[in-house]
Image (cartoon, grey):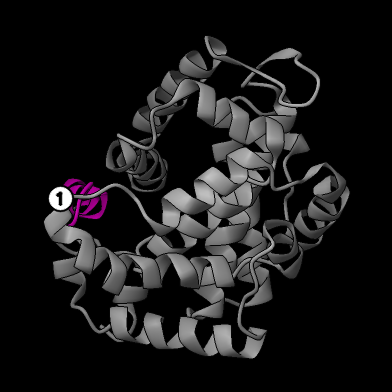
């Protein structure tokens, strides 16, 4: 599933969703320069996901240890109370994890990637490992769709779209770029960002205060985009950084492929 090209749209949806937790987004604002290093931050996230998906167990454990060490040194100030807190609070780590995994699963399935409910439950359960790697108690991480839905229902009262969330929204719509690339940003990137935003749950649209097309329209657009992107040959798509799939194939042998590409061979 992580080899599907719609994961890039899903990743943007995750950023929109994560920004709705005031303490989580404040931690980002105070500890990263995402406005000037957007590509670097995106690639670091992609590298972590790629390593934990396609790398060796040892590489995944090292990646998790690096994340835990960095988080242990960072703090932020609560925008409402002024309280100082660590960005590695379990509640914040859990929110970031669930927003990410829910976005991956939601966008990829909704865009036409074939997954049964049992497979979706298994996907969520497998990611208890990635939750452990960033410092969570795996037993406290949702293990299926029902537990994930219950988690979001529980956390919703804590969500709000404050100034930080709107700064993320503005950044995702208009990321800094070279003046010559501004037309491409308007023609391509903004369409992707708008599609990611539209795929958010209705309560997220209400919090941001920005409407979205009807769900049926969004689903059609996701399916059309997924169909188009999946027409690009996999070998060409896998050349994009960080190239974890190609490295895994080289490590495991010439017959190794991500599971969907073995069908019909």
Please say whether residue 233 is one of the residues in the magenta stretch. Answer: no
Tag 1 residue: 250
Point out the stretch of residues depicted in magenta.
240-252
Question: Residue at (65%, 84%) from the top-left corner?
Answer: 215
The percent coordinates of residue 14 (x first, y second) are: 55, 53
Which quadrant: the C terminus?
A: bottom left
Q: Is residue 161 above or below residue 140?
A: below
Q: For residue 244: magenta? A: yes
Q: Residue at 66% of width from left, 48% of height from top?
A: 98
Q: Relative to 54, is 222 above or below? A: below
- Look at 57% across and 89% down and name the residue there: 217
Kindly indicate the quadrant of the structure image that contains residue 203: bottom right
> Can residue 103 be seen in the rendering of this structure?
yes
171 shown above or below 163: below
Q: Residues within 10 Å of mark 1 (few under 14, many from 20)?
A: few
Q: In this view, does 162 lie to the left or right of 14?
A: right
- Kindly report the secondary structure that dominates the magenta region of the rendered protein: helix
The percent coordinates of residue 140 (x first, y second) are 77, 36
């Amino acid at each position: 599933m992580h080899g599907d090209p719609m994961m890039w749209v899903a990743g943007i949806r995750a950023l929109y969703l994560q920004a709705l937790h005031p303490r989580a987004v404040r931690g980002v604002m105070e500890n990263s320069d995402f406005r000037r290093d957007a590509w670097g931050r995106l690639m670091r996230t992609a590298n972590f996901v790629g390593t934990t998906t396609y790398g060796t167990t040892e590489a995944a454990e090292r990646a998790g240890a690096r994340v835990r060490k960095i988080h242990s040194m960072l703090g932020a100030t609560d925008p409402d109370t002024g309280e100082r807190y660590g960005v590695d609070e379990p509640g914040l780590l859990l929110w970031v994890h669930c927003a990410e995994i829910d976005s991956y699963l939601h966008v990829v399935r909704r865009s036409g990637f074939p997954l049964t409910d049992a497979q979706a439950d298994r996907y969520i359960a497998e990611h208890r490992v990635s939750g452990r790697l960033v410092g969570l108690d795996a037993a406290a991480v949702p293990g299926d769709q029902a537990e994930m839905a219950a988690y979001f229902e529980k956390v919703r009262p804590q969500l709000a779209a404050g100034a930080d969330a709107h700064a993320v929204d503005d950044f995702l719509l208009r990321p800094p770029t070279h003046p010559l690339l501004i037309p491409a940003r308007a023609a391509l990137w903004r369409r992707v960002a708008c599609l990611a935003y539209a795929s958010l749950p209705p309560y997220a649209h209400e919090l941001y205060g920005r409407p979205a097309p009807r769900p049926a329209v969004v689903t059609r657009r996701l399916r059309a985009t997924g169909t188009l992107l999946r027409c690009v040959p996999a070998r060409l798509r896998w050349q994009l950084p960080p190239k974890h799939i190609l490295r895994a194939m080289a490590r495991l042998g010439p017959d190794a492929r991500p599971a969907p590409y073995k069908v019909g061979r």
